[in-house]
Image (spheres, coloured by chain):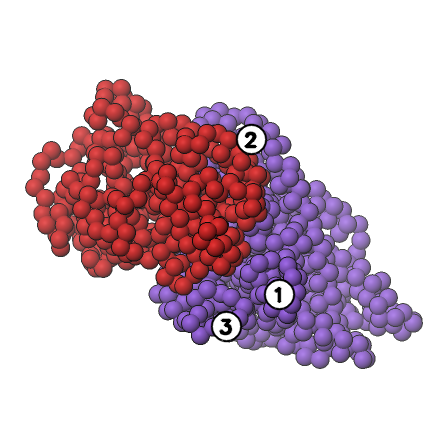
Chain colours: A purple, B red
Amino acid sequence: MERHARAVSAAASSTESVSAQKIAGYGVATVAAVLVLYPVFYLLQAALDVGDPQTRPPTAYGLDNFEALLNYPQIMLNTLSVSFAATLMALVIGFIMAWILTRTNVPGRLVFEQLMAVPYYLTPLLGALAWSMLGSPESGFLNQFWRALGGSGHVIDINTPYGIAWVMALFEGSVAFVMIGAVMKSMDPALEEASQVIGASRLRTMLRVTLPLVIPGVLGAAIFVFAEMLGSFAVALVLGTPNRYYVITTAIYQLIQQYPPRIQVAAAMGTSLFAVMFVMLFIYRRIVTAGSYVTITGKAFRPRVADVGRLRHLLFCVCVLYLVVSVVLPIATLLYASVQKIAVAFPAADNFTLDNFRAAMSMNAAGSALTNSLILAFATATIGIALMGLLAWLIYRSRLPGAGLIEYVVMFPQAVPRLVFAFGMMWAWLAFPIPIYGTLWLLLIAYLTVFLPLGVRTIAGVMLQVDKSLDECAQMCGASWMFRMRTISIPLLVPGLVAAWLLLFIASVRELGASILLMGPHSKVITPSIVESWFGTASELTATLALIQTFVVAAAVAVLVVVTRRVSTHVVN
Amino acid sequence: MAHNKHGHITRRALLKAGVALPLVGIAAPNVLSQPLSKSPSTVLDFQTNADVAKAEQEGQLVFYCHENEAGTAGIMQGFNKDFPKIKTSYVRAQTGALYSKILAERQAGRFDVDVLQLSDLAPAFDFQKKGGYEHYESPESGAYKQDNLSTPKGYFFWTGVDPAGIAYNAEKVTGSDAPKGWKDILDPRWKGKISCKISASGLQFVQWYMLRKLYGDGFWQEFAKLQPHAFDSRVQLFDRLSKGDDTITAIGEYPAYILFKSRGAKVEFVAPADGLVATPLVVGAVNKAPHPEVAKLFVDWAMSKRGQAWYQTNPNLYYASVRTDAPPMPTGVSLTQFKLLYPQDWDDYSKQSATFLKEWNGMLGL
């Protein structure tokens, strides 16, 4: 009798659990689908629009805009080659730095780890501006020094495709470190220790044990970074256009700026990238589902780092070098430029000025735009973490039918340059009956949409490492889905969730492509304002604005890191 | 202006406008709604038909502008200084993107804009055809030639012109080697060292149109062989010029020259004997504006001597005023001292847009 009652109670609990899962799963899937597919519909409609470009809804449909893409083979080739080179550089840098800082006892490891996030929130525009000042063939400071020392011509040309890829890798690709690092942190060191115990060298262990275990993280990062590179705008704009080197985003930018704008061709150009993205996603899913990458199991472990002996000094130098080229040199260059009337390598008293700071402080960008950006970033990260966490769980953990399809939907925004996706969002939310157009709410929705791939991919990388058996074990004991989420899944994921929250926060502050078009007169945000400044004022004033943004965001992030650490410690305890 | 050579509204034009009106969500042609006579009042030192008390009650101006961030903010600052009770806000983008945005908004039934400023007459004509402008004849119109006003009057006006010649880096080019006329920019020695603007620029379109008329189709084909570097804004062109990244620019805008010269840049300006190419910057009140009295007040202020002085002396604008009684520019040079080259047949100019875009984008590898 008692056994029977227990069985009935377990069955009831299981039914209740499935029902809660279904409600949560399908609810969040619906939200994601609306956020993504609603603007995608308008985007596809524009790509197929062959009628009067100034009239909406379209008056005629056809494939002419896709046929027009055949006129741009060089641009397509430029985009793919520079994106590939930049992704490769970003992954190599990201993997090496993540390995050094999470798996070895390099001196100052914790400090370096904090500093590694800096290139990400420096914004690609700041990086491109700084490296443009450093490495332009004629006016670049490094080349001026070179000629002053008796050299001729230039020693570095940042306007070449390799130069562009280098800056993209440093500033757009630094997310690879965060994504790979998050995975490495959650890895049980016993596996590497076992490898070394049986005589494998450190390098062999890294290549044969560490690397295969972080493959989901690396692949996730590769897909994400490649898509990020395809959509990279600021770096290609600042460094590519002076050399007549156009990629899809800069070409699209030209097409939508001119009168009459060729938005339809731009939409076709953008949506054609869906195909590239889906092939990559398909490959990723095949690899991930083919193997097991679980590193967090029911067996307890304490994250430990390996003693690498004297190699630690060399690794220390690698870390310092990376931070010099990605943080110290760019910031020092912009600081130096910001106190000059016209930025030149050699200082002169009559060229010194503080007017750039005075002018910057009086501009909207330094005041309301920065405040709006911080508010939006906080809201995007907080709402986003819940939404994207649930989506990651839905895709990788739930057994609900159709969950795999959601991943493809979620990746849509990453496949299209945000400059183009923003048009879809503008048309979509203009037609929406609730008047959110032109407000910060629209930007919040836009950010939640365009950062779905970033958030889901980051959380998924960590989630894949948590053994399902922990959850299943609790389920067998009769724990409900909500209870299991609260007591098992979320606490195990907290370090990853905190990293994802910070990533979303920073990504929101530096967002450019979508904001340019969706900002209203009362909803300005900072990064587009800085780009506007670059177009319309001077590189010295733009450098000043970028520095102000960086320092304010750095201060905000420092506060948030302290708070989130406390929260995270509290939750885990 | 050749746009409507007769200077009045024809029955056909009205019918056409009637067809276009539903597209932009207009209930009735506003040209008919304006009172026929109303005596203007004097505010500060200019004339206006706007009810200033009502405008202050509306309390807000929403301005859409092609000008760069600093320039747009500068215009708002000037108006707000004179009318501190009216808060200002703006959206800025290049003319193409800005025009697409305002059209999309209006087609969706959103009317958030009071005043629109564009750097190209082609979209301004289109907006007028679509019935997007509010018809408002400013009492300050008398200080402008008909050529610098819309046809018929009251839809938009030229708030200034942006004249451009040739500019070069004085450290890289000596005075004797400097180009003297437009044809000198075709010298092969400038290959890879010359700059121009992208096709989004209204001024670049005017230059392409006018020099093609003067020197024939081959002029730009020769220019393409120099592999010019193209940029969005005048500031970028002069920024590169002052640092030696480019040696000369084929489209050196006079306002940017004044700005960079004042910063101590080693740049020089050449006014070719055949004339400076110039593009009008056009301002008009938008119909169904959320703050209609403010829109009128702004148009009057912008047309007035006071507003024009602000446009002409603000370092981020330095627009040359086309008011008949305009004072000289900050350099002491008056616009009348320059021979200006701009299209006389604006209809023909508008029709050449597709050819220009194709040729210019093709030249840049786009």
Mark 3 surroundings within 10 Å by alpha-carbon count, few (fewer than 14), some (14 through 19), many (20 or more)? few
Q: Could you tell me which quadrant the C terminus of chain B lies in?
A: top right
The answer to which image quadrant residue A298 occupies is: bottom right
Q: Mark 2 — residue?
A: A65
Instruction: Please report, as a chain letter, where disc 1 is located.
Output: A
The residue nearer to you, when weighing B201 against A555, is B201
Residue closer to the observer: B106 or A345: A345
Q: Earlier in the sequence, mark 3 or mark 2?
A: 2
Give the CA separation, mark 1 to mark 3: 16 Å
Residue A324 horizontal side relative to residue B240, left or right: right
**Mark 1 belongs to which amino acid?**
Arg
Residue at screen point 68% across, 71% down: A321
Tell if the residue under mark 1 belongs to the same chain as the one under mark 2.
yes
In space, the residues marked 1 and 2 are separated at their CA atoms by 48 Å
Task: In the rendered structure, find residue A435 and report the number of the disc placed on it.
Answer: none
Mark-to-mark CA distance, 3 and 2: 51 Å
Task: Name the residue type under label 3.
Answer: Pro
Residue A347, numbered label? 3
Check the image and name the residue furthest to the top.
B12
Q: Are marks 1 and 3 in contact (CB under 8 Å)?
A: no
- On whether disc 1 and disc 3 are found on a single subunit, the reply is yes
**Mark 1, residue position:** A147
Horizontal and vertical percent position of residue B97: 43, 42
Give how far across and how far down residue A85 sits, in percent: 70, 52
Residue A370, visible in the rendered structure: no
Query: Which residue is located at x 75 percent, y 74 percent?
Result: A315
